[in-house]
């Protein structure tokens, strides 16, 4: 991408999209097309087609998605599969029809089977059954990856995909009903400290192992592979390092200076027991993460504390 290239970031208000925008601007890209939901509903095919015909973006980062944690995925599977299938289908087809130079689709680590070989190589895709709690979202994301592959195969479109591991950082979702584990733990521990609660309850046993990538590193990796990768198979984005949910909770407790107890509700679902990605392909391409977990958690906690009033108002609206 050149500095003057016309770039559309779909989903620019979300955790992923906003980080990509920040990183693009930092690298000198100013010709960005940014549309919020009220300006462009990606679920509506006619609206998407009209947008692409009028704007003619050269490059597309497809970061728009309906996302959520175990609770939301398990409770609203129809919404997750429908919304995500429509978004990716409309954008990928419109990008093809309007001769976009290159498109990058962002998947999710839940695309891999529940009991994948660890660390998870890209080749594990479609090799076994998915984790039931986020199956609907995973199927939709798999469809997006496969669409990019098939449009490349049939038409020669330069549509590529990446698979970020668990992300966290600025602009994350801290709503306890729909958030992922990292922001949920940060909010729970912060509020417990603020209100002098003696304990914080964490869902599950605390034993599942997870990998976390700071969203600013993810954005840098996305721009890197947009400029340096053109192959059919998707690329894992991550650190290759893992931590148990229990140790993550204790880390957040330490960073926030909370003196209470962490307890586990073992009646709640754990999800996939272990999920760490093989990032050797990404490393061979020449990219490695810069933000270590403790530093990233500290950055995210500080951002949350600075934005807590605004975030609480957003949660009320939901």
Image (cartoon, helix red, strand yellow):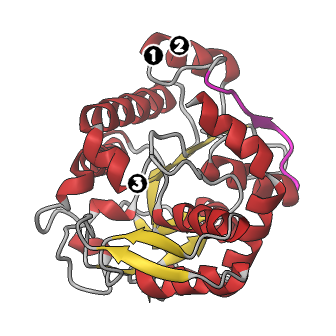
Mark 2 to mark 1 CA distance (whole Å): 5 Å
The part of the image, by quadrant, that contains residue 59 is: top right
Which corner quadrant of the image does residue 20 belong to? bottom right
Question: Which label lies toward us, 2 or 3?
Answer: 3
User: Which disc is residue 69 wearing?
Assistant: 3
For label 1, the residue is 44
Number of numbered callouts drawn: 3
In front here: 4 or 89?
Answer: 89
Circle 1 packing at 10 Å, graded few (<14), some (14-19), many (20+), is: few
Label 2 sits on residue: 47
Q: Which mark is drawn over residue 27?
A: none
Q: Which residues are magenta?
A: 27-37
Please, which residue is most extreme toward the left here? Answer: 128
Q: Circle 2 sits in a helix, a strand or a loop, which is it?
A: helix
Disc 2 packing (10 Å; few <14; some 14–19; many ≥20) = some
Residue at image position (42%, 26%) is 90
Inter-mark Cα distance, 1 to 3 = 25 Å
Task: Provide residue 133's location: percent of width, then percent of height.
Answer: 23, 55
Tag 2 and tag 1, C-beta contact below 8 Å: yes
Which residue appears at 32% of the width and 31% of the height?
79
Residue in view at x 78 percent, y 45 percent: 309
**Of pointers 1 and 3, the one earlier in the residue sequence:** 1
Q: Image check: 185 left or right of 234?
A: right
**Does 39 appear above or below 177?**
above
- Percent position (x, y) of residue 251? 59, 86
């Amino acid at each position: 991408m050149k500095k003057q290239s016309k770039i559309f970031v779909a989903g620019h208000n979300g955790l992923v999209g906003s980080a990509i925008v920040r990183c693009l601007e930092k690298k000198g890209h100013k010709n960005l097309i940014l549309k919020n939901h009220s300006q462009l509903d990606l679920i509506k095919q006619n609206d998407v087609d009209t947008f692409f015909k009028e704007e003619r973006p050269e490059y597309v980062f497809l970061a728009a998605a309906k996302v959520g944690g175990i609770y939301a995925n398990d409770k609203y599977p129809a919404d997750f599969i429908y919304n995500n299938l429509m978004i990716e289908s409309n954008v990928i087809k419109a990008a093809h029809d309007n001769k976009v130079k290159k498109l990058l689709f962002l998947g999710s680590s839940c695309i891999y089977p529940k009991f994948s070989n660890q660390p998870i190589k890209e080749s594990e895709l479609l090799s076994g059954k998915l984790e039931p709690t986020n199956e609907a979202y995973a199927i939709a994301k798999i469809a997006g990856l496969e669409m990019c592959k098939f449009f490349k195969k049939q038409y020669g479109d330069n549509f590529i995909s990446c698979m970020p591991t668990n992300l966290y950082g600025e602009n994350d979702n801290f709503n306890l009903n729909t958030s992922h584990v990292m922001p949920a733990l940060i909010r729970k521990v912060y509020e417990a400290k603020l209100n002098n609660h003696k304990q914080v309850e964490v869902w599950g046993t605390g034993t599942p192992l997870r990998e976390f990538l700071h969203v600013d590193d993810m954005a840098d990796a996305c721009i890197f592979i947009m400029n340096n990768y053109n192959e059919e198979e998707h690329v894992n984005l991550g650190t290759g390092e893992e931590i148990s949910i229990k140790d993550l909770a204790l880390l957040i407790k330490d960073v926030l200076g909370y003196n209470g107890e962490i307890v586990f509700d073992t009646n709640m679902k754990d999800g996939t027991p272990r999920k760490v990605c093989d990032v050797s392909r990404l490393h061979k391409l020449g990219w490695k993460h810069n933000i270590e977990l403790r530093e990233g958690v500290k950055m995210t906690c500080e951002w949350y504390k600075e934005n807590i009033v605004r975030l609480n108002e957003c949660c009320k609206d939901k």
